[in-house]
Image: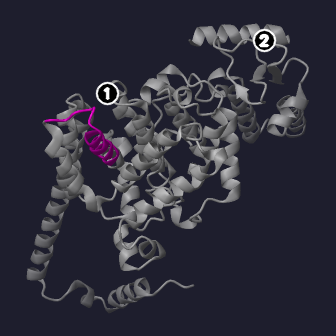
Amino acid sequence: MHVCVCYFQDLFRSAAEAGPHDILKLYNPKGNIINISPRLEPNSPNSCYKLEVVAADCNSEPLGVELAVALGFDLSSMEKRLQGLEKKILIEAGETPAVVYEMKRQVESFREKLESVEHLSWLGLFKELSEGTQKPSPFYHKRTLRKTREECEHVREKFLQMSSLEVSEEVRQYLKTPTFDNWQWEDAEIMVLLQVMYTDLDFIATFNIEPEVLHKFLYEVYKRYNNIPFHNFKHCFCVTQMMYGLIWLTDLKSKIDSIDLLTMLTSAVCHDLDHTGYNNAYQINARTELALRYNDISPLENHHCAVAFEILEKNENNIFRNLTTEQYKRIREGIIKCILATDMTRHNEILNKFKSILLVFDFSNKDHRDVLMMIMIKVSDISNEARPMDVAEPWLDSYNLEFLLSTGFIGFVLLPLFIELANLFPCLEQHIIDPVRKALDYYTEMEKALEREKLIRAQSDKAAAAKNTTPQNLQNPQKTANSLSEAGNALKPPTL
């Protein structure tokens, strides 16, 4: 694939009479940047591609206009100015300062990035899948709850530019696995990956979903996930990606209708829309507007569902607008069931219902399929611990910012749920059950280590107390006063 792309790059260079180090950009008739690849659609007088040379070899005549438009400056001119500066300093000072060498290094590094096919192709064909995990931002408390208009517009522009790029087969296959690392991807890239899911499951063709409508739908979904530590747009993607992976792993495409698969994937995309970070218990106890509106019955999940259909109510966002009335009714009913099933207060009810039909499970039975769809979204929703530890742990940190999580949740809620799904699909044992068991062992050992540390500290304190009955702080009045002062400050309410 890499050789083919390089060959096509050379053909386009020849056509543009560009040098070996010049950078090319190709635009489709709509003005979006696209990959130069063997899979390009044929050109025609009515659908012309635009080929642009946006940077040139520094030894040739500079093409400063295009680069200035794209990057805000002319790289060749910068290099020439830097060379002139270096000569002037050398004449006046007799030697070149280290700072000039550093500036030259940075310019050369920037040129290499610009000239690299891998860099320009975005995740197109060469995104490095072994990059280290990027930790979640710890600064949610300094951001507004709702995304700003500027933030959204920036992501929208990047998404629209990337939306027509071809995602490599390597990335497509990786996207189907439970080991997928969400931390490597920015929001605009995530939207493209969601688009890939709808495409590769044949939803675009089967349900006549126009690409522009899918773009608007995904963008509106992105906008309605808030800047909170856990239930944010990345969580939406993780749940959807796990659902997508499970669909492929269990070969569900051959077992249930495409319309049910579309329902499941879209439910995952929408399942936490406009979550504000406060759980149902808080909503009910605080008598919030949501709790009052939904009479204390799954207030959050009802809200997520309502926001989803609020987005879909606008024709320009409605990915279901070309379905029949009966199809739309079926999807709406299914999405409501799936999203409401993510309320953990219904966990035992849904799990027991699934257990009761497991031995006689029939894919042609609508009631059975409905329960399976609810189980699938529940599994996807709490699946972080089925992922590799370096992917799962940052989510644990994020979760702790919103909720108190313990190994009890993994052992008594998550693992039993996963086991029952694996009873229907034995192939999931190695993909999601084994990783969860390892995660449980890991966190159990962490808890034991903490308990041992507490015990050692307690024994140490007891031994110290036996040697000296006078508390240590009381031996130093100033230290005691400082400690009390610090404690008092910590208890003061924040200044408004």
Q: In this view, does 312 lie to the left or right of 129?
A: right
Specify the principal SS of the magenta part.
helix
- Identified by mark 1, the residue type is Lys
**Vertically, is 325 above or below 482?**
above
Closer to the N terminus: mark 1 or mark 2?
2
- Identified by mark 2, the residue type is Arg
Residue carrying label 1: 255
Total labels: the figure holds: 2
Q: Residue 13 carries which label?
A: 2
Report helix, strand or loop for mark 1. loop
Name the residue: 68% across, 15% down: 40
Q: Is residue 137 left or right of residue 254?
A: right
Range of the magenta residues?
360-378
Name the residue: 38% across, 42% down: 391
Name the residue: 75% across, 7% down: 11
List x then y, in percent, for residue 173.
Answer: 43, 24
**Vertically, is 39 above or below 271?**
above
Report helix, strand or loop for mark 2. helix
List x then y, in percent, for residue 293.
Answer: 45, 73
Instruction: From the viewer's side, name the closer residue of 120 and 424.
Output: 424
**Display colour scheme:** one colour
Whole-angstrom CA distance, mark 1 to mark 2, is 48 Å
Q: Does the magenta stretch include residue 375?
A: yes
